[in-house]
Amino acid sequence: MPYRPRPPLEANGSAKGGQVGHQLFMSCFLYILKNTNGRHYIGITDDVEVRLNKHNRGHVRSTKAYGPWLVVHTEEFRDKTEARKREVFLKKTALARKVLFEKLASSSNG
């Protein structure tokens, strides 16, 4: 089943966390990192800047040998479950990754 994201949080791009009706929610981000050799890493977090610092300080086992890293893409989700679904979809679907990485490459070149 293809991934179908929920609509954006709010048109005004409100900050992390907020209230919809009586339900409290915390934003979660899917992020894509790229190193100088062109290697990509896909992950999720509630704070992209803090997570990037962990990657670049060698505190993440799967990326510590390949840094330094730069954030090349982020997507915001209502909650961790939605972000995780998107992460799993991208990690398991080679064509989806290829299309997204090509789109990122073309947007950074133009």
Image (cartoon, grey):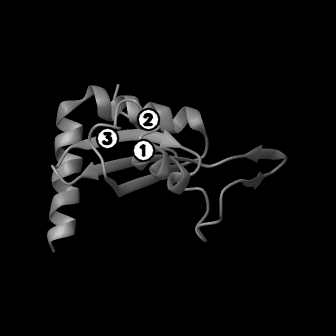
Q: Give the label on residue 10, or none.
A: none
Question: Image quadrant of residue 71?
Answer: bottom left
Tell me if 76 is positioned left or right of 103 in this view: right
Name the image quarter holding the C terminus.
Answer: bottom left
The local crowd at label 1, few if under 14, some if 14 to 19, many if 20 or more residues have their Cα within 10 Å, is many
Mark 2 vs 3, N-terminal side: 3
Return the mark for residue 55. 1
Labelled pair 1, 2 in contact (Cβ < 8 Å)? yes
Q: Quadrant of residue 95?
A: top left
User: Residue at label 2?
Assistant: 60
Residue 51 placed where, x, y %? 50, 47
| Label 3 sits on residue | 41
If you read the primary sequence from the N terminus, does the residue marked by circle 1 or circle 2 appear first? 1
Disc 1, disc 3: CB below 8 Å? yes
The three-letter amino acid code for the residue at tag 1 is: His
Front disc: 1 or 3: 1
Amino acid residing under circle 3: Tyr
Tell me the quarter of the picture where residue 106 sits: bottom left
Q: Residue at x 33, y 49 (%)?
A: 33
> Residue 105 location in percent, x, y?
17, 59
